[in-house]
Image (spheres, helix red, strand yellow):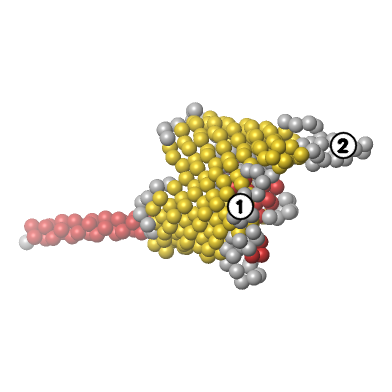
Amino acid sequence: MNMITKTNFVKNIFLTTLMLFAAISTFAQEEETEEISKPKFTLSGSVDGYYRTNFSDSPTFDADGNLLTSTPDPGTAFANQTGFAVGMGNLIASYEGSKVGAVLDLVVGPRGAGATFNTDIVDGIVNQAYVYWNVSESTTLTLGRFNTFLGYEVIAPQANFNYSTSYLFSNGPFSHVGLKADFALSEDFSLMLAVMNPWDTNDITTTGEYSFGAQLGFYGQYLNFYYDSGENGGLGTEIDFTGGFDLSDKFFLGINAAYDTNGAADSGFYGAALYPQLTTSDSFAIGLRAEYFQVTDGSEAIGDAATAFTLTGSYTVENLIIKPEFRLDSLTGGFLDSDGASSDSLSSFALAAIYAF
């Protein structure tokens, strides 16, 4: 009888211990689940500035020291000022949950003002503001204002290899306001569909018009499509290819080609750009952008094509990126020299510093 009692006692201790371990394990799993699902707040951004000079005659002044002729620039977006200049300050706040999240992207400075068509370069400017919902592992819905899916280059300078921007980027849309759906069709294929306000309509559409966009991704290459009616200043129709290939461990070749036509405005453009980039060490790389760009009347070329060659070095020290850049633009009669006379080319040098966090 005593033996039976002791045996039951041992069994009870053993069962109690198992139940205790099970409870601890369940509690730990619940804590881990809560930790995973707990919303995460992050803050990131960048600050950049640069110095730029043209290899041309000095600008002319009157007797009172007023500038008589404007300093020539390549006519592309951003990095067009001479002397010392500010690019932009960028602050991105994101709140990410297990299925939903929100992003608020604010910019100040000339680059941010140009990207959002806001002439005030002092006050805070909304670059992006959107919410998203991960409906499933393969489907995400995004609503709000987001940067464009078209083109090889982007607004944020730290995300581009070259500091100045291309003609293709400068003539396409910068941002959209609308609803998009991203689908991961497989590990290597993706699809995006969007309905939005017309091109660069940053707030609301007052005409009742909308635009439509699509992107097919395949093995890191992207075929993009955009359409609006072209009325009221819209872009029209644009087909765009963006991609690139790692030709070796240290050599990358980026590619961008686009064709745009706007029947309503009787205008358009087409062009292509190559981005060969060579990484020489963990901290330094050098790259070239070679671009061809042609303006059209919607069906035929207007005037001569513009060509631009931009050679950029990229040196990284912790979070700081230093970019020396030489640029040569050519277009028959497309530029003015510092005396206001017509010129077929413009050469310039820029030294930029970008801090990203």
Q: Counting other residues with Cα less than 10 Å from the Cα at mark 2, is it few (<14), some (14-19), or many (20 or more)?
A: few
Q: Which residue is mark 1?
A: 300
Q: CA distance from mark 1 to mark 2?
A: 41 Å
Q: Quadrant of the N terminus?
A: bottom left
Q: Are marks 1 and 2 in contact (CB under 8 Å)?
A: no
Give SS at disc 1: loop
Left or right: where 279 falls relative to 8: right
Give SS at disc 2: loop
Q: Residue at x 63, y 63 (%)?
A: 264
Q: Is residue 17 above or below residue 156?
A: below
Q: Residue at x 36, y 51 (%)?
A: 187
Where's residue 345, x and y in %? 69, 36
Left or right: where 142 falls relative to 342: left
27 vs 202, nearest the viewer: 202
Where's residue 276, x and y in %? 51, 35
Q: Is residue 57 above or below residue 213?
A: above
Seen as rendered, the residue at the extreme bottom is 208
**Looking at the image, is mark 1 or mark 2 earlier in the sequence?**
2
Q: Which residue is mark 2?
A: 61
For residue 279, say whether it is visible. Answer: yes
Q: Quadrant of the C terminus?
A: top right
Q: Amino acid at mark 1?
A: Glu
